[in-house]
Amino acid sequence: MEELSTTRLRLRRWTTDAPDVDFLVDLHSRWEVMRYIGRWPRVASDRSEAVRRAERYAGMDHPVHGIWAIEDVATGRLHGTLLLKDLPASGAPVTSPDPAPSGDTEIGWHLHPDAWGHGYASEAAARVLEHAFAHGLDQVLAVTHPDNAASQRVARRIGMTGLGITGRYYDTTCALFRIDRPTEADPAG
């Protein structure tokens, strides 16, 4: 997984070291962060969940996809997570540990409340979109809970177009957004 950067942010691989795990414990134990994530939102119940999550994030090895820690260049403080990954299709058996991939790529972000309102999600997501398109992806999707207006604003800010409500992903109802790779004639997107 490639490390990425902006003027203010470094997007790096997660580690299983204590500072990263501690941050994930804090992030995922907050209802205001988790309330819109997943079919049945819930906060993390213990440190072992954060360790398993850190191991999964740190172990992701793909030439284009990734799950990055969003780190402040100036302070080293973590702000959240930026992901670019396979988007799970709805309809996988309930007993399946891994949902079936849809063939689509998803971009998403989960930021700590202390990082909200500073433009970090938009900045990190725009950088990951540049990375995705530079590595040959033609289209990237985002799905949000229909009531998550803040995430929908981020999607629009990075140039995504709202496509309405869908049930095609995650076995739940989502607001769907899409952005296509800019063409040579339209480098700004």
Image: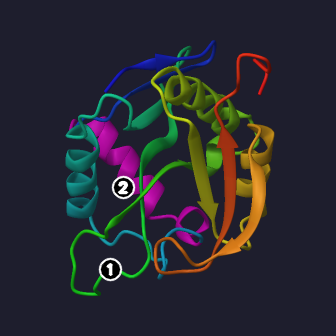
CA separation, marks 1 and 2?
29 Å
Instruction: Tell me, for residue 114, which label it has, or none.
Output: none
Residue 24 among magenta residues: yes
- Magenta part, dominant SS: helix
User: Along the line of sight, which residue is nearer the eye, 153 or 34?
Assistant: 153
Is 158 above or below relative to 108?
above
Residue appearing at x 74%, y 73% in the figure = 147
> Residue drawn 20% across and 56% down?
52
What amino acid is found at the position of numbered circle 2 in the picture?
Val
Q: Secondary structure at mark 2?
A: helix
Residue linked to disc 1: 92
Which image quarter holds the C terminus? Answer: top right
Q: Which residue matches tag 2?
A: 25
Q: Residue at x 46, y 44 (%)?
A: 83
Magenta segment boundaries in residue numbering: 16-35
Give the residue type at disc 1.
Ala
Image coordinates of residue 70 in percent, x first then y, are 49, 32
Q: Can you say whether 177 is above or below 99 in the image?
A: above
**Sequence-wise, which precedes: disc 1 or disc 2?**
2
The crowding category of the residue bearing disc 2, from other C-alpha atoms within 10 Å (few below 14, some 14 to 19, many at least 20), is many
Q: Is residue 90 magenta?
A: no
Number of the front mark, 1 or 2: 1
Give x and y (percent) for residue 111: 57, 47
Left or right: residue 69 compared with residue 72? left
Image quarter hosting the N terminus: top left
Q: Secondary structure at mark 1?
A: loop
Here the colouring is rainbow
